[in-house]
Amino acid sequence: MHLLEKLDLAISNCVSGESVSVEFTYDELQTIRKMVVLSAYEDRLSND
C-alpha cells in the first residue's frame, strides 16, 4: 500500500470511528513530517 493510501485509510478510520490499525514505517513517518513542514512553510510564505 502506498503512503497516501495509508494516510487516507488512517484519516478515514479516525473520522468514521473504526478501529482498523494502520502501521507506518519510520521512513514513511519522516516523509509525512516533511510534507507537513513544507506545507506549513508554503502557507506562511503565501500569507506574507
Image (cartoon, rainbow, N blue to C red):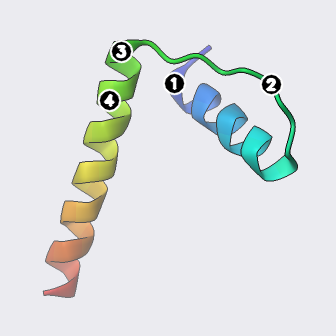
Q: Are marks 1 and 4 in contact (CB under 8 Å)?
A: yes
Query: Which residue type carries mark 1?
Result: Leu
- Give the numbered dot on residue 31: 4
Residue 13 position in % (x across, y down) = 78, 39
Question: Considering the numbered disc 3 on the image, is that residue within a helix, a strand or a loop?
Answer: helix
Query: Which residue type carries mark 2?
Result: Val
Vertical relation: 2 (above or below) 12:
above
5 horizontally vs 17: left or right:
left
Q: Which residue is mark 1?
A: 3
* Quadrant of the drawing holding the C terminus: bottom left
The disc, 3 or 2, on the residue closer to the chain's N-terminal end is 2
Quadrant of res 6 = top right
The disc, 2 or 1, on the residue closer to the chain's N-terminal end is 1
**In whole angstroms, how far apart are the C-alphas of marks 2 and 1?**
16 Å
The disc, 3 or 1, on the residue closer to the chain's N-terminal end is 1
Q: Residues within 10 Å of mark 3 (few under 14, many from 20)?
A: few
Residue in the image at 50% along x and 18% along y: 24
Q: Residues within 10 Å of mark 4 (few under 14, many from 20)?
A: few
The disc, 1 or 4, on the residue closer to the chain's N-terminal end is 1
The disc, 4 or 2, on the residue closer to the chain's N-terminal end is 2
Question: Considering the numbered disc 4 on the image, is that residue within a helix, a strand or a loop?
Answer: helix
Query: Which residue type carries mark 4?
Result: Thr
Q: Which residue is mark 2?
A: 20
Question: Considering the numbered disc 2 on the image, is that residue within a helix, a strand or a loop?
Answer: loop
27 horizontally vs 11: left or right:
left
Residue 42 position in % (x across, y down) = 22, 65
Q: Are marks 3 and 2 in contact (CB under 8 Å)?
A: no
Quadrant of res 44 = bottom left
**In whole angstroms, how far apart are the C-alphas of marks 1 and 4?**
9 Å
The disc, 3 or 4, on the residue closer to the chain's N-terminal end is 3
Q: Residues within 10 Å of mark 2 (few under 14, many from 20)?
A: few
19 horizontally vs 21: left or right:
right
